[in-house]
Amino acid sequence: MDGHRTGPPRGTGEQDPAYRRAHQHPSTTPPTVVAVTTIVRWAKVDALDPDLVPEWLTPAERGRHRSLRQAVDRRQFVGARQLLRDTLVELLGGSADDVELHQQCDRCGGAHGRPMVRIAGRPGPHVSTTHAGGLVAVAIASNPVGVDLEPVGDTTTDTGDLVTWVRTEAVLKATGHGLDVDPRLVGISGPDAAPRLETWNGPGRRPAVTLADLDLGGGLVGCVARLGRGRAGVDVAERTLAVLPSPSSTSEPAR
């Protein structure tokens, strides 16, 4: 389904030699994740103030935030963006103020659709965001990527069906089609089998895509899909969001 920071988490980013080797980039080239590893970070948003509007939201994002009637939706909206900013700084260094997130629907021109990032005005890596049940997750990779998660137990939907759904939506996010393509046109392996794309009746050629189920702890199912052939590692970790009031943040009236 379809953030103000206090600094990157300790023990990651520049402090971690593995991250430095995998994700450093020369300052003269556009920032990118150069390793095949797909980075997934997820967080809970229940502690966020639903009416806090961080100053770094774009005018279009502020408009979307105002349009959301439910507090959990406003928390998820800001939380996903904050988590993405935090994670990009964790991996690539620099300042969160340099991160710009753009979304524009190819069909209607609205401020939604496949997210794209620019860092200090230059193209960033491929990203995907998702939210559900008071949780948000982001995926970052060097190739187009899609991530989806669903809580288990909040609905009467069978867990196996949820696994199939998150795998399908992750593929459609990675290809850029989203739900403009009927999910029934995407054939995914059964929930008890290793995740893979088996058939494709959507537009164009069948995409080369690598899928990985996500271990997000009990009560959640998730999947990340990355375009391209070959095996790719997935680095998954939970993060804690801290969106705090500041002189540059505003709080909108309760709806």
Image: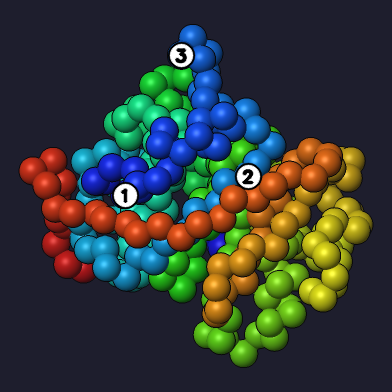
Tell me the distance, in whole angstroms, between the alpha carbons under discs 2 and 1: 21 Å
Residue closest to the eye, 190 or 72: 190
- Label 3 crowd (10 A; few <14 / some 14-19 / many >=20): few
Query: The C terminus lies in which quarter of the figure?
Result: bottom left
> Which mark is in front, 1 or 3?
3
Judge by depth and name the residue closer to the eye, 51 or 134. Answer: 134
Q: Position of residue 61 (x, y in %)?
A: 35, 45
The residue that mark 1 highlights is 3
Q: Note whether residue 107 is visible.
A: no
The type of residue carrying mark 1 is: Gly
The label shown at residue 137 is: none
Crowdedness near tag 1: few (<14), some (14–19) or many (≥20) residues, C-alpha within 10 Å = many
Mark linked to residue 38: 2
- Reading the chain from its start, which is encountered first: label 1 or label 3? 1
| Residue 13 at x, y percent in the picture | 43, 38
Badge 3 amino acid? Ser
Above-or-below relation of 203 to 41: above
Q: CA distance from mark 1 to mark 3?
A: 26 Å
Tag 1 secondary structure: loop
Name the side, left or right, on which 13 lies relative to 164: left
Q: Is residue 89 above or below residue 194?
A: above
Label 2 or label 3, whichever comes before in sequence order: 3
* Disc marking residue 27: 3
Of 52 and 38, which appears nearest the observer?
A: 38
